Amino acid sequence: MVKLIKLMENAYEQKYPNIPITYGVPEGRANGSNQGIKNL
């Protein structure tokens, strides 16, 4: 799943270079969907 998300992130950044996105923690490492749900 992480590889797929990174591919989508790269494609999005190419299409919309001025819109920042964040995936995982600031270093770009995934921290798990359970933690993401808790963060919401």
Image: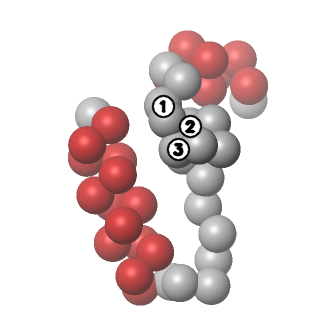
Whole-percent x, y for residue 30 in the image: 48, 31
Q: What element carries label 2?
A: loop
The residue at which mark 2 appears reads as 24
Are the two marked residues, 2 and 3, in contact with CB atoms closer than 8 angstroms? Answer: yes
- Give the crowd class for mark 3: few <14, some 14-19, many >=20 residues within 10 Å: few
Q: In which quarter of the image is residue 36?
A: top right
- Tell me which residue sits at (74%, 25%) in the image: 39
The residue at which mark 1 appears reads as 30
Q: What element carries label 1?
A: loop
Q: Give the farthest residue toward the front.
A: 27
Alpha carbon separation for disc pair 1 and 3: 6 Å
Whole-percent x, y for residue 38 in the image: 70, 17
Q: Is 20 rendered above or below residue 27?
A: below
Q: In which quarter of the image is residue 35?
A: top right
In-front residue for pair 39/29:
29
- Tell me which residue sits at (36%, 67%) in the image: 10
Left or right? Give the position of 1 relative to 27: left
Alpha carbon separation for disc pair 1 and 2: 4 Å
Whole-percent x, y for residue 18 in the image: 62, 85
The residue at which mark 3 appears reads as 28
- Tell me which residue sits at (63%, 77%) in the image: 19
- What kind of residue is marked 3? Gly
Q: Which of marks 2 and 3 is in front?
A: 3
Left or right? Give the position of 8 relative to 19: left
Alpha carbon separation for disc pair 2 and 3: 5 Å
- What kind of residue is marked 1? Ala
Q: In which quarter of the image is the C terminus?
A: top right
The numbered disc on residue 18 is none
Q: Quadrant of residue 21?
A: bottom right
